[in-house]
Amino acid sequence: ELTAVIPIIFYHGKKKWDNKGFEEYFGNIDNELQNFIPKFDYELIDTSTYSDKELREHFDNIELQVGLLIMKNIFNEQKMLEQIGHLSEQINELLRTKEGKDFFDSISVYMLNSTEITSDKYRELMETISTQAEQQFVSTAQKLEYRGIEKGIDKERKRIALKLISNGHSNKLIIETTELNENDIENLRELYRLNKE
């Protein structure tokens, strides 16, 4: 027995969503293929059509309230900072549980990666909410920074390894120089070979 599926598009982009039939997104498609294009409607949730107040009142779930308000205002940094200030009660509520802390970490990473606002500015704001909010945010920001440093180091090691491979050096020397493992070096050798062809 088949079950009906209702497609839902969640959108919070800068431009207004162009609401049209699903089949129209395929553009000018060959007539022979037209019969194979599904034609159906979808439910659109566009955060720009809701006021901040409506989003707060419409959802009882704290994660939804916080997540939606931050996503809605992510492109307007001043407004987003104001929203975080208004969400102090909800943020403190989140930090009472392990799941809430994990969600707070995800939102913090999203904010740091999606805006030009410095981690110091966010930290100052979290400090006004509570000591726990500040500590949780600082911990997440430090982990993110550490991961970024690690990625940079890894990228540099691979760049050096490729240079050594191109100069015909042995795996033993490359391992001693870069501390990469044998498997990584063999993958880089294959990549180097493919790029040469």
Image (cartoon, helix red, strand yellow):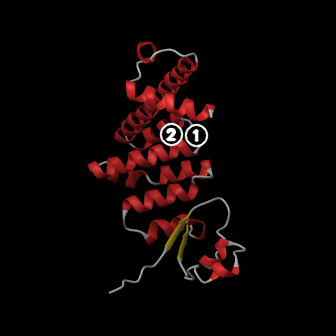
User: What's the residue type where badge 2 is placed?
Assistant: Tyr
Which image quarter holds the C terminus? top right
Horizontal side of 192 relative to 106 (left or right) equals: right
In this view, the residue in front, 171 or 147, is 171
Residue 57: x and y in percent read: 45, 69
In this view, the residue in front, 38 or 7, is 38
Q: Secondary structure at mark 1?
A: loop
Above or below, 65 against 111 in this view is below
Q: Residue furthest front?
A: 197
Q: Quadrant of residue 178?
A: top left
**Residue in the picture at 58% in, 44% down:** 115
Q: Is residue 107 above or below residue 46?
A: above
Instruction: For the residues labelled 2 and 1, say whether their Cβ atoms are less than 8 Å apart.
Output: yes
Q: Is residue 25 left or right of residue 168?
A: right
In this view, the residue in front, 70 or 52, is 70
The numbered mark at residue 117 is 1
Mark 2 to mark 1 CA distance (whole Å): 7 Å
Kind of residue at disc 1: Ile
Residue under label 2: 122
Which residue is pictured at 56% across the width and 29% down the height?
192
Work out which residue is located at the far right of the displayed protein and give it. 28
